[in-house]
Amino acid sequence: MRLLVVEDESRIADFLRRGLESAGYAVDVANDAAKALDYVHATEYDLVILDLMLPDMDGLDLLKKVRNRKTSPPVMILSARDAVDDRVKGLELGADDYLVKPFAFVELLARVRALLRRGTPTPERLQVGDLVLDCIRRKVVRSGQSIELAPKEFSILEYMMRNQGRPLSRTMIVEHVWDVEYDGLTNIVDVYIRHLRSKIDDRFPAKMIQTIRGVGYMLETNDKTAERTAEV
């Protein structure tokens, strides 16, 4: 899942990015409203964490612009404004939660997970053939067998399952999962794909991770007889 943090204080933004990435999320950071709007128009986010004290626009005005889009992600306000009127106004304008600074990261993470459970526009449970991924509990099962994945492996698999049947370039995978620009030299995607194949493909007759020559990778299954409901 991909989150957008809108925060102009670099220390807090870096703290949030590191903490959320260690929890398995891909994170973009915008330090002003203009950059945040560019990100929101270009990317479908699962959640936005929004500070109200931005250098170029009040955060509540930015919230209105986000909410005016045809589709908009859940929004958590993260602000030092602790007056009841501020909290009420934020929630009335469409925020899904309001957390006052200073905060404990464990509480923020719990609230993020709660919002993703109830408010994400994308499914919490993904299934391709006999492969099932639980996005909230972060569990993977294939043919009834539980599969343990490292955080980056899980993020790559989730991205591929959300884009079933769509070829994904190495650039797309790196920028989505690692949140960095792809330099064209690293083989990190190929390394992680080999790890994934060893866990979700090698022990099973139907291979799901396809190599698209000259492009990258795609997750797909043509074995419709293998499709069934699996419990995670």
Image (cartoon, rainbow, N blue to C red):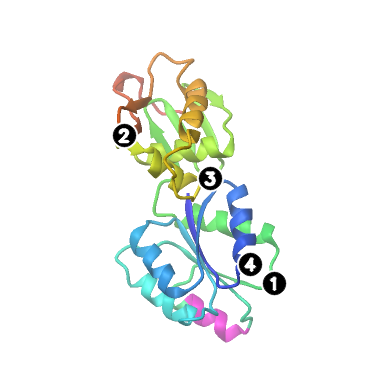
Q: Give the Cα separation between the discs numbered 2 and 1.
A: 45 Å
Local SS, label 2: loop
Sequence-wise first label, 2 or 4 = 4
Q: Give the Cα separation between the discs numbered 4 and 3.
A: 25 Å
Tell me, yes or no, whether the two marked residues, 2 and 3, touch with CB atoms within 8 Å.
no
* Picture layout, residue 17 above or below residue 193: below
- Numbered mark located on residue 136 in the image: 3
Q: Toward the viewer: 21 or 81?
A: 21
- In the figure, is residue 190 to the left or right of 164? right
Q: Could you tell me the amino acid type at mark 3?
A: Ile
- Numbered mark located on residue 12 in the image: 4
Disc 2 designates what residue? 215
* Picture layout, residue 140 above or below residue 80: above
Residue 89 in magenta stretch: yes
Q: Could you tell me the amino acid type at mark 2?
A: Val
**Where does residue 86 sit, x and y in percent of width and height?**
56, 83
Local SS, label 4: helix
**Where does residue 64 sit, x and y in percent of width and height?**
39, 77
* Picture layout, residue 164 above or below residue 98: above
- Residue located 55% across and 35% down the image: 139
Q: Residues within 10 Å of mark 2 (few under 14, many from 20)?
A: few
* Picture layout, residue 92 above or below residue 176: below
**Quarter residue 7 falls in:** bottom right
Q: Could you tell me the amino acid type at mark 4?
A: Ile
Q: Could you tell me the amino acid type at mark 1?
A: Pro
Q: Give the Cα separation between the discs numbered 2 and 3.
A: 30 Å
Q: Is residue 90 visible?
A: yes
Sequence-wise first label, 4 or 3 = 4
Disc 1 designates what residue? 102
